[in-house]
Image (cartoon, rainbow, N blue to C red):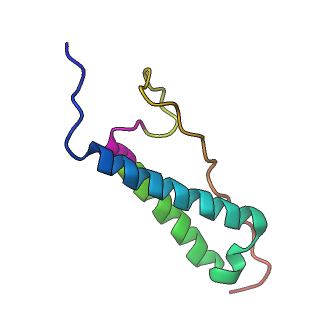
Amino acid sequence: MSAPQEGRYDSIARRWLALVERRQAHLTELTETGRWRHYYTQAEFREEVDRLLLVREQWAMIAGVPPRGEDAEEEKEPPRPQIRQIRVPAPLWDD
């Protein structure tokens, strides 16, 4: 059997996936520092994180990258660093 051929738009899809992963890293940083409170309410931040995780999985499927948690066969590219899922801290005030 032959290996699947790279599609015309695979490199574009991988670049969009990289952009989404950079956004995920930014939200992780906001969570760790607590700065998310300056920009979002708790509900808005939770919604933004949920939307980001959904978009990340969609771009991963389009780019042909296995979803998180599944074992992948040997890849040609080095594995990407794992970004842990964002945990939204308890609010300090009532909305």
Task: Look at the picture and state if 85 lies above or below 30.
Answer: above
Task: Determine the residue positioned at 52% across, 69% down.
Answer: 48
- Whether residue 61 is in magenta: the answer is yes
Q: Residue at x 43, y 25 (%)?
A: 75
43 relative position to 65: left or right: right
Q: Position of residue 24 (x, y in %)?
A: 56, 58
Q: Nearer the viewer, residue 52 or 5?
A: 5
Residue 49 image offset from top left, x and y in percent = 55, 64
Left/right of residue 25 with respect to residue 14 in the rendered view: right
Residue sitting nearer the eye, 18 or 84:
18
Residue 59 position in % (x across, y down) = 36, 51
| Quadrant that contains the C terminus | bottom right
Residue range corresponding to the magenta coloring: 60-66
Residue 88 showing in the rendered view? no
Residue 15 is left or right of residue 84, and the answer is left
Left or right of 53 in this view: 3: left
Residue at far bottom of view: 95
| Residue at 61% from the left image edge and 64% from the top image edge | 27
Percent across and percent down for residue 39 are 64, 81
- 46, 1: nearer the viewer: 1
Q: Residue at x 75, y 62 (%)?
A: 32
